[in-house]
């Protein structure tokens, strides 16, 4: 109920009437929204990955691309959203394909900056899988840049983290980049 009181006060502070019929349920809706978009704080990512490890001798690159995500900018509390592309080269351990989007969701459902989000995904996969290499590329649009400040509506931000062979070996990195560009 504390969130609802905060939202009611916010409405008053911006000059609105929270008792207006159209706004009566807004504080409860916003509280429910915040509960949903901040679920990532409740996810133990290392435990989730550990319980889903599969020991397999597969050693070729695995890529999951075009994974939609939504997050909230920690500076303005407005959304940024886009697509994440993830690759790893296993070294005896793999995980189910669905775990990669779950990792992205767990970290994106926290207050974030895109750079940290990219690093957290790569680090979590690297720590759990101990692969030969991990790559994460995130392409996103930030409403804080589109709605305020520089107001550049068509700007996209790309961040990347490459670890192991995806960092050290241009052939592996080029393969990842080629696979996500299809």
Image: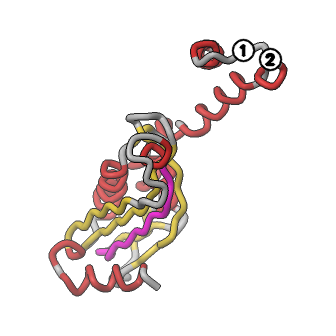
Q: From this viewpoint, which residue is outermost toward the right?
A: 21
Q: Quadrant of the N terminus?
A: top right
Q: Residue at x 43, y 38 (%)?
A: 111
Identify the image quadrant of residue 59: bottom left
Determine whether, in the image, residue 4 is placed left or right of residue 171.
Answer: right
Residue 44 percent across, percent down from the top left: 44, 42
Residue placed under numbered mark 1 in the picture = 17
Query: In this picture, is 41 found above or below 89?
Result: above
**Is residue 82 highlighted in magenta?**
yes
Q: Residue at x 24, y 75 (%)?
A: 166
Return the residue nearer the eye: 84 or 45. Answer: 84
Residue placed under numbered mark 2 in the picture = 20
Q: Are marks 2 and 1 in contact (CB under 8 Å)?
A: yes
The kind of secondary structure element at disc 2 is loop
Total marks placed: 2
**Is residue 152 highlighted in magenta?**
no
Q: Residue at x 64, y 18 (%)?
A: 11
Q: Residue at x 42, y 63 (%)?
A: 139
Identify the image quadrant of residue 179: bottom left
Region in magenta: 80-92
Determine whether, in the image, residue 172 is placed left or right of residue 155.
Answer: left
The kind of secondary structure element at disc 1 is loop
Q: From this viewpoint, which residue is outermost toward the left?
A: 168
Determine whether, in the image, residue 45 is placed left or right of residue 116.
Answer: right
* Residue 111 in view here: yes
């Amino acid at each position: 109920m504390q969130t609802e009181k905060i939202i009611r006060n916010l409405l008053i502070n911006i000059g609105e009437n929270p008792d207006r019929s159209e706004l009566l349920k807004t504080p409860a809706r916003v509280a429910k929204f915040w509960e949903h978009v901040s679920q990532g704080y409740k996810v133990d990512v290392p435990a989730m990955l550990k319980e889903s490890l599969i020991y397999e001798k597969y050693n070729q690159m695995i890529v999951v691309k075009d994974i939609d995500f939504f997050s909230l900018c920690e500076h303005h509390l407005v959304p940024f959203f886009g697509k994440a592309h993830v690759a790893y080269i296993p070294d005896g351990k793999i995980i189910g394909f669905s775990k990669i989007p779950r990792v992205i969701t767990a970290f994106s459902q926290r207050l974030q900056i895109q750079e940290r989000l990219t690093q957290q995904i790569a680090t979590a996969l690297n720590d759990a899988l101990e692969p030969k290499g991990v790559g994460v590329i995130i392409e996103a649009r930030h409403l804080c840049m589109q709605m305020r400040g520089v107001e550049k509506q068509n700007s996209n931000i790309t961040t990347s983290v490459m670890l192991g062979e995806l960092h050290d070996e241009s052939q592996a990195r080029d393969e990842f980049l080629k696979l996500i560009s299809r």
